Amino acid sequence: MIGGPIYDRVALIGLGHIASSMFWAMKRRGLVGHVSGYARSDETRETARRIGLCDTVCDSLEDAVTGADLIVLAVPVGAMGPVAEAIAPYLKSGATVTDVGSVKKDVIAKVAPHIPDNVHFIPGHPMAGTEHSGPESGFATLFDNRWCLLVPLEGSDPEALEQLRRFWEGLGAHVDEMDADHHDLVLAVVSHTPHLIAYTMVGVADDLRRVTENEVIKYSATGFRDFTRIAASDPTMWRDVFLTNKEATLEILGRFTEELFALQRAIRKGDGAHLHDYFTRTRAIRRGIIEAGQDTEAPDFGRVKVER
Amino acid sequence: MIGGPIYDRVALIGLGHIASSMFWAMKRRGLVGHVSGYARSDETRETARRIGLCDTVCDSLEDAVTGADLIVLAVPVGAMGPVAEAIAPYLKSGATVTDVGSVKKDVIAKVAPHIPDNVHFIPGHPMAGTEHSGPESGFATLFDNRWCLLVPLEGSDPEALEQLRRFWEGLGAHVDEMDADHHDLVLAVVSHTPHLIAYTMVGVADDLRRVTENEVIKYSATGFRDFTRIAASDPTMWRDVFLTNKEATLEILGRFTEELFALQRAIRKGDGAHLHDYFTRTRAIRRGIIEAGQDTEAPDFGRVKVER
Ligand SMILES: NC(=O)c1ccc[n+]([C@@H]2O[C@H](COP(=O)([O-])OP(=O)(O)OC[C@H]3O[C@@H](n4cnc5c(N)ncnc54)[C@H](OP(=O)(O)O)[C@@H]3O)[C@@H](O)[C@H]2O)c1
Ligand SMILES: NC(=O)c1ccc[n+]([C@@H]2O[C@H](COP(=O)([O-])OP(=O)(O)OC[C@H]3O[C@@H](n4cnc5c(N)ncnc54)[C@H](OP(=O)(O)O)[C@@H]3O)[C@@H](O)[C@H]2O)c1
């Protein structure tokens, strides 16, 4: 690393999908000096020790955060407040606390009050992840070419912010800044509502008596299986997202239902022109996503082996 | 091919995604003798000639179907009836007509009346496809390990049915039989409703003023981009699907809306237990799909390069 590590000592609180990916990405580039980690359960801490996740796995929050320059809260959104409260007494003066939670307004409301005046709090959220969870699901390349949103608070220290930005860039991400309100609305559109809809569709299929689960599974390559990937994500993480980003999710769900009803009416009335127009308009966004390097152009996400 | 080709002469009507995949899959195994093809536009016929799609590309339906033992209708569902009417006078006695349309009741109603008594009509539907369309999008492996549904009519000739079954198995597929009503309901669940929902979600994102298209694109890896793949499918094909599988699609959409409202209410009321239970239940189906070899277990459909 040119100019030495970005942080000397980093503490990861929570050792799941995001924290473990951060660890491997830090090690790949020698981004930091020492990484300590803490997870709630004995099981996760043991797994972490076995696979070499973190330089030191600690059995208490106190041990993990003591002396750390950067503390990353990587637990479900609903656990952020209690964890912040529990670590507050052990935070080093001048340290930075950040988080990776999928919701920002609620996390700020729950965490900020516990952060001492001599510690920086800069919320964050990497726009990356897979449907897998837990300490063994992380990998170093998760953040490559993805975006990380930083959500500085009023009066955030510019140097601490700049350091955190360089850290995320070192992990492979591009960094943007945004305020918490806008973050939560954007995420309701690109992530939270799509997840709720996918869960719903899979739930409907699971619940029908007239179509068997076996049929759903066998014929899923016609579209359904894409929804099951998203709907296989961690239930606790997603429960917390919907409980804490209630307002924006309900707003976007309202818009979604409106549009769905309009299409439903077009189907009922046999309005082919309306359907064709709608289905044509939505193609442009896909092209944009591929051109921006945010998805593959290969058919079926490259799942199929294409051969002539 | 042990025992020689399954059909001597095959005619492909429509030279798009499905027909071109069938052609390359037939050639891979020497499944048939000669393949003739017809497409509506000069442009598609020229492309087909350029890339060697079909042994003979014909400029008229008459030339394409004359002498054929198997005629495959591979055009949008709404075009099946007119095409069947146009080819009827040229069909050879004892030939089999099949189709690959995504809807079965409507296709049967529109096609069957045109088929002469001395010709077999056995509807079919391969449960495979990607978001791409047109003559250049096909590939030989599309049907490998996927299912093809055959929908024999009352009094279908058992030998003709058996021959068509062997043909699809030769293309790489497993074959099931089903009646048209049940087919259309199953497809409404696994394919048609998921597509409508994906189109709707992408439409909502496209339409919002407060979240820019650029934001949607940059942050799409958080879930949204999966929906854009499905919503990039051919507008004409999907318009026809919804116009012709109206009843079953509206039924499943009704169920979907009910469930979505229940989840929406749980979010509004802060009922975390309801959300957590729902999100847990939907994971089992994903496991079933992976175990059945219908999707990859790799995170993110294998789009990401996983590295430690
Ligand atoms: N997964 C994604 O796609 C994604 C993307 C961006 C942001 N995020 C955000 O990242 C955060 C972590 O998600 P993840 O995917 O890494 O989750 P994960 O793989 O399920 O890991 C969660 C970690 O948090 C710990 N934990 C759970 N509940 C806790 C509690 N009440 N108190 C203390 N620790 C607790 C768990 O400990 P045990 O293992 O001991 O139970 C585990 O180590 C969440 O806020 C999520 O919103 C996730
Ligand atoms: N794509 C899938 O995922 C999938 C999966 C299973 C079943 N299917 C079904 O397979 C059939 C074909 O779909 P595809 O994906 O192969 O479509 P495609 O790639 O868009 O090709 C459609 C073909 O039909 C021709 N065509 C279109 N309208 C016509 C008309 N009015 N009269 C005569 N020919 C016409 C087109 O000719 P030009 O090129 O000259 O316009 C083109 O050759 C549809 O019934 C669809 O429901 C599709």
Image (cartoon, coloured by chain):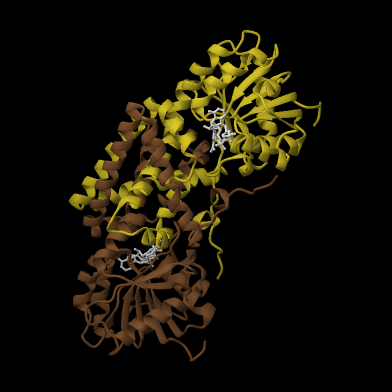
Chain colours: A brown, B yellow
Relative image position of residue B125 (x, y in whole percent): 56, 29
Q: Residue at x 28, y 62 (%)?
A: A184
**Number of numbered discs visible in the structure rendering:** 0
Reply above or below: A227 against B164: below
Residues B62 and B243: in front is B62
Residues B83 and B171: in front is B83
Q: Is residue B40 left or right of residue B187?
A: right
Res A210 visible? no
In the picture as drawn, the residue positioned furthest to the bottom comes out as A3
Residues B206 and A168: in front is B206
Reply above or below: B281 against A2: above
User: In the rendered view of the protein, which quadrant contains the C terminus of chain A?
Assistant: top right
In the picture as drawn, the residue positioned furthest to the front comes out as B42
Q: Residue at x 51, y 75 (%)?
A: A52
Relative image position of residue A74 (x, y in whole percent): 36, 70
Relative image position of residue B170 (x, y in whole percent): 70, 32
Residues B179 and A214: in front is B179
User: Residue B214's image quarter?
Assistant: bottom left
In the picture as drawn, the residue positioned furthest to the top comes out as B117
Q: Is residue B261 left or right of residue B248?
A: left
Relative image position of residue B127 (x, y in whole percent): 55, 35
Res A99 visible? yes
Q: Quadrant of ligand 2?
A: top right
Q: Residue at x 40, y 65 (%)?
A: A127
Reply above or below: A123 against B158: below
In the picture as drawn, the residue positioned furthest to the right comes out as B3
User: Residue A266's image quarter?
Assistant: top left
User: Residue B200's image quarter?
Assistant: top left
